[in-house]
Amino acid sequence: MDPIIRVESLHKSFRDLHVLRGVSIEVNRSEVVSFIGRSGSGKSTLLRCINRLEEPTSGEIWIDGVNIHEPYIDINKVRAEIGMVFQSFNLFPHMTAIDNIMLAPVCVRKISRQEAKERGLSLLEKVGLAEKANEYPEKLSGGQRQRVAIARALAMQPRIMFFDEPTSALDPEMVGEVLDVMAQMASEGMTMLIVSHEMGFIREAADRVLFLDEGKILEEGTPDDIFNRPQFPVTRDFLGKVL
Amino acid sequence: MLKDYTESNTFKKLRDTSGRVPLIRQPVFLIASCVALVLYGSMLFWASGEGLVIRIALSVFVALLVTWTGIIITDERRGERLKTSMVFLVLAVLVLLFLEFHVTNSEEIIELFFNITVIKKAWPYLVLGFKTTISLAFMAALVSTVIGLTLAIFRSFDNKVLNFFIIAYVDFFRAIPIIVLLMLIYYGLPFLNIRLSAFASGVLGLGLNSGAYVSEIFRAGFLSVSKGQLEASRALGMTPWQTMQKVALPQAFKAVIPPLVGNYVASAKDTALCSSISIIELLKAGTAQQSLNANPSPLIFVTVLYLILFVPLTRLCGYIEKRMKKTQRQITV
C-alpha cells in the first residue's frame, strides 16, 4: 500500500539557520509516528512544513500520492485533510467551544450549521467536554482547551493528525486527560504524527519513533528499539536526560 | 553572614526623618497663614483705586494663595475635604478678583455675551449648523473607516509594493494639516475639473485625514491577533480571506474599539475646520450670526453646543476603554 505521507530530502532554512537538512520519511495509513529530539532539532518545523505552514526551502512532499507543491494544488484542501494540534492550543478566544469546532466544517466543508453542531457536540462528548460546549476558551482549563482544540481538528474529519507538543504548555495534572484522548484516537486507527516529550505515552502509543538531531533523522525504529537499544551516543544522551 | 539591615545607615536616616513633620506641613503653620491670607485679602478688597501698589500686592496675594493650595493638595496627610475646599477657595478668589477689577458693568456682560434676544434670533441657524456638523462627522467617520480598514487589510498581506503606497498615504495625510487639505480639495480640485460641493469636500478631506489614523489603528489591531490564531485557522483549511473574516477581524475589532471611538470623536471636532470652506456647520453658523447681529452671544452658545455634544462623547470613550480593559484579560488561548 502507498504511504499516506512521503517526504523526500526536505530542507528548510530560516535565513542563516539551516533547520532541516534533508529529511526523508514515509508514513503509512493508521500509523502513529512520534518525533523526538532536543529543542531546535527541527521536529516542529518538519510538521509545519508538511502542511506548508512553513514553506520548505527544497524537497518534495506527497500526501496521499499528491505532490503538495504542484502549482495546481489547493493547499487549503490538503490542510483540510490534516488536523493540527498546537502547543499553545490557539483556540479562537471570541468563540465558544462549539463555535470553535463548527467554524471550519461550515466554512471549508460547507456542511450545514445543524450538521456541524451535531458533529461538534458528539466530538465534545468524545473528548469528555459535552457540558462545556457554550463556554468561551478563557473559562476552560489548559487541558480542556487542548481537548477542545483536538475536537476542533477532528471536526474536519481529517485523515491525518499532527500534534505539535500538545502537552508542553499544560500543568502536569492536565497532561493525562489530553494523552487519553490521543491514545483513543490512535486505537481508532488515525494516522498520527506526534512531536512530544511525553516518553511514557510514546512508548505506549507510537508504532515508530524517529529521533531527530540537527535537522536530520538520526535514528528510527519501534519504541522498544529506540528506548531500550539506542544506537547513537546522542540518542542515548538525550534519552538519559528525558527518561 | 547576613547584614543587619535595621542598623544600616539608610534605615537610620529614614527613621530620623519619619518622626519629624516639616514646618510647612504643621497645622499651626497652616492655620496661621490662612488667617494671614484672609486678612491680607480683605484689606485689599477694602482698599479702592487701581494704583500700582495695589496691583503688586494683589499679585503677591494670588501667588501666595496658589502656592498654599499647591502645598496642601500635595500633602497626603490632609483630608480630601480640605483639599477640595482649598481649590474652591482659590477659584472663588480668582473670580471675585476678576469681577472686581476687570468687569465694570455686569449687565453689559450679559448684554454682550448672553444676549437672549440675539440667541433666539440665531437659534434656527445654529440648529441647522449643528445638524450639518453631526452629519459631517458621521460621513467622515464612515469614509475614514472604509479607507482605514481597506488599507489595514492590504497592509496585513505584507506585500512590499503595497506597503510602500500605504505607508506613503498614511505619512502624507498625517503630515498635512487638515485645513490645508480642505483648501486643496475645495479650491484646488476645480482646476482639474473636479468640482465637489463644499459638504463633499469637507467629508473627503476629513475622511482622508482620519482614514490615515484609522488604518494605523486597525493595523495595530491586526498585529494584536497572534500568529498562532492565524496558523490555527489556516491549518484547518480556511482560506486567507476566511481567516481574515472569521478569525482576525473579530479579534482585531474588539481590540480597536476604544482607540477607534477616540479617533472618531477627535475627527468630529475637526469638523469645525470645515467652516473655512464655507460649509455652514455649527461654527460657521455661529460666526455668521455673530457678525449679523454684531454680538458674540451666538459664539458663546456655539461653545455650549459643542460642549453638550462632546463632553458625553469623550466620557463615552473613557467608559469604553475602561470596560474593554476589564473584559480583556490577557490569556493564551
Image (tube, rainbow, N blue to C red):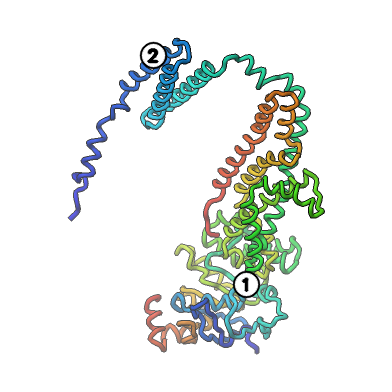
Above or below, A184 against B134 in this view is below
Q: Chain of mark 2?
A: B
Q: In this orientation, which residue lies closer to the viewer: B92 or B61?
A: B61
The N terminus of chain B, quarter of image:
bottom left
Number of callouts in the render? 2
Residue B211 is marked as none
Answer with the quarter of the image where residue A79 lies: bottom right
Whether residue A147 is visible to the viewer of this picture, yes or no, is no
Marks 1 and 2, how far apart in space?
84 Å
For image coordinates 64% across by 60% down, the residue present is: B168
Answer with the quarter of the image where residue B166 lies: bottom right
Task: Please give left or right for residue B71 compared with residue A154 in the image.
Answer: left
| Amino acid at pointer 1 | Gly
Q: Nearer the viewer, mark 1 or mark 2?
A: 2
Residue pointed to by mark 1: A83
Image coordinates of residue A142 in percent, x first then y, are 52, 60
Image coordinates of residue A23 in percent, x first then y, are 53, 85
Residue B39 is marked as 2
The C terminus of chain B, quarter of image:
bottom right
Q: Secondary structure at mark 2?
A: helix
Residue furthest out toward the front: B52
Image coordinates of residue A47 in percent, x first then y, are 56, 77
| Amino acid at pointer 2 | Leu
Q: In this orientation, which residue lies closer to the viewer: B234 or B165?
A: B165
Answer with the quarter of the image where residue B102 lies: top right
